[in-house]
Image (tube, rainbow, N blue to C red):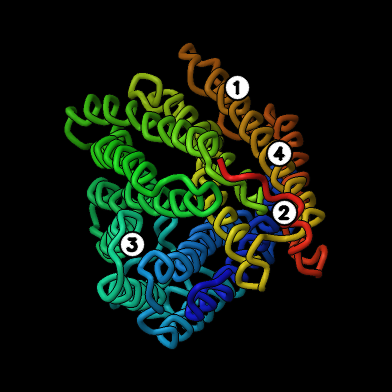
Amino acid sequence: MMKYTSQQVAKPYFIFALVLFAAQIAFGLLMGIQYINGDIGFPAIPFNVARMVHVNLLIIWILFGFMGASYYLVPEESETELFSPRLARITFWIFAVASVVTVLGYLLVPYAELARITKNHLWPTMGREFLEQPTITKIGIVIVCLSFVFNIGMTILKGRKTVINMVLITGLVGLAVFYLFSFYNPANLALDKYFWWFVVHLWVEGVWELILGAILAFVLIKVTGVDREYIEKWLYLIIAMALISGLIGMGHHYFWIGAPEYWLWMGSVFSALEPVPFFMMVLFAFKVVKERRRSHHNQVAVTWALGCSVMAFLGAGVWGFLHTLAPVNYYTHGTQLTAAHGHLAFFGAYAMIVMCIISYAMPILRGRPQGNPLAAQRVEKFGFWAMCISMIGITLALTAAGAWQVAMQRIPESGEALSFMATQGELMGVYWVRLGFGVIFALGLVAYFASFFVGRETVRAEAGAAMPQTS
């Protein structure tokens, strides 16, 4: 059962994160259709706007998920109430309103006009991929992040200091600090891209991995009963390898922007090591579940934890390695192979860990300490498999499209190479396959949502019948 009343502040963060997730998938489906017929949605929602909204929603909903996870697990880890539940609620509404207004701005106002309205000329920061937010929105995000980190940090300071808390707060501080580079927008394009990756790469291949590891460790402790010291040792190893490989591995983005030649070697070697911490995460998760001392009634949360480790290894590890070496990236840079890696990596590493903590924590927040009823868990498990299988299908389709794109557009050097648009026409069949898997993914997400409304009765009887012996 929930130990601290202030953990309830996590609930609106989780709910809003899932609402934004659904919106992100809706725009993803629209983009899938526009790949086949670019006139769909035009001029109301052209492809560039749909893509901007799709990507920004991805970042925002995962941040909401991280914040909800932190507000839930830190009081329990620290064995004390949250420092300021009121600040957490205020932060939620500021961030939620700012997010909705910004997305509506993308949809309702031409981007150049949005830049003029928000006085971007006073401090130009707009116009860069993933960082399209108006400067005033970026300032609001910084305020939200600082208040959030302050609230979490003060809670940890007044309570118990655990490895999970320390790893989590390190990742959260890094998240806030590296976002400050979004305000630096030099006129030189190469210099701009050099520091742009300080936000994008050092988030998703650096400090976010610390947050992922902390949340995964917390859930595994709760659902397996394995000794904390054992899990903490694994966590130290994973985050050490993640930071060593991820920080210097940022160089694999510097191959084609005018950076010094040594980045070809440093980026290739260290980014080739990035699958190692994700493989260690797979070993860690399966070993802990195998050696569990108890079997929690919320078995679907265990499924999410194991699935997250596997899908993160495939997406961030295997598919990242496929095109990270400089001689390979020479041909694959900016093709659909990049999209294949991005979709599977983001879903496996970050979307799934957020759904994992929601799957574990939301039943408790709703008065079901042993998890949702078995009927609800079966529905949720269907959603899990539908989303995972369809994401693998999307990834394989995009991988085939990327390889085909390289063969038709980039490898021929005798003047027989097709143009970009001619190549896209040849890939139309693959885009239909990708769209089909996207529809299946959306159905899986609907099942995930539906599971929260199946079996409203308590699960005490089920828990008593299903709880096995302690080993």
Element under disc 4 = helix
- Give amino acid for label 1: Trp
Q: Which mark is residue 390?
A: 4
Q: Which mark is residue 404?
A: 1
Q: Which mark is residue 73?
A: none
247 or 189: which is nearer to us? 247
- Give amino acid for label 2: Leu
For marks 3 and 4, the one nearer the N-term is: 3
Residue 10: where, in percent of width, then height? 52, 73
Question: Which residue corresponds to mark 2?
Answer: 445
Query: Mark 1 and 4 residues: CB-CB less than 8 Å, in contact?
Result: no
Quick check: 432 left or right of 210?
A: right
Element under disc 1 = helix
Give the quadrant of the N terminus.
Answer: bottom right
User: Separation of disc 2 and disc 3 at Cα?
Assistant: 27 Å
Label 2 Cα neighbours within 10 Å, binned few <14 / some 14-19 / many ≥20: many
Give the quadrant of the C terminus.
Answer: top right
| Foreground: disc 3 or disc 4 | 3
Residue 292: where, in percent of width, then height? 53, 41
User: Separation of disc 2 and disc 4 at Cα?
Assistant: 11 Å
User: Separation of disc 1 and disc 4 at Cα?
Assistant: 21 Å
Quick check: 256 left or right of 343?
A: left
Query: Mark 1 and 2 residues: CB-CB less than 8 Å, in contact?
Result: no
Q: Which mark is residue 172?
A: 3
* Residue 18 in the image: above or below residue 344: below
User: Separation of disc 3 and disc 4 at Cα?
Assistant: 31 Å
Tell me which residue sits at (45%, 86%) in the image: 90
Quick check: 233 left or right of 369?
A: left
User: Separation of disc 3 and disc 1 at Cα?
Assistant: 40 Å
278 or 471: which is nearer to us? 471
* Residue 194 in the image: above or below residue 102: above
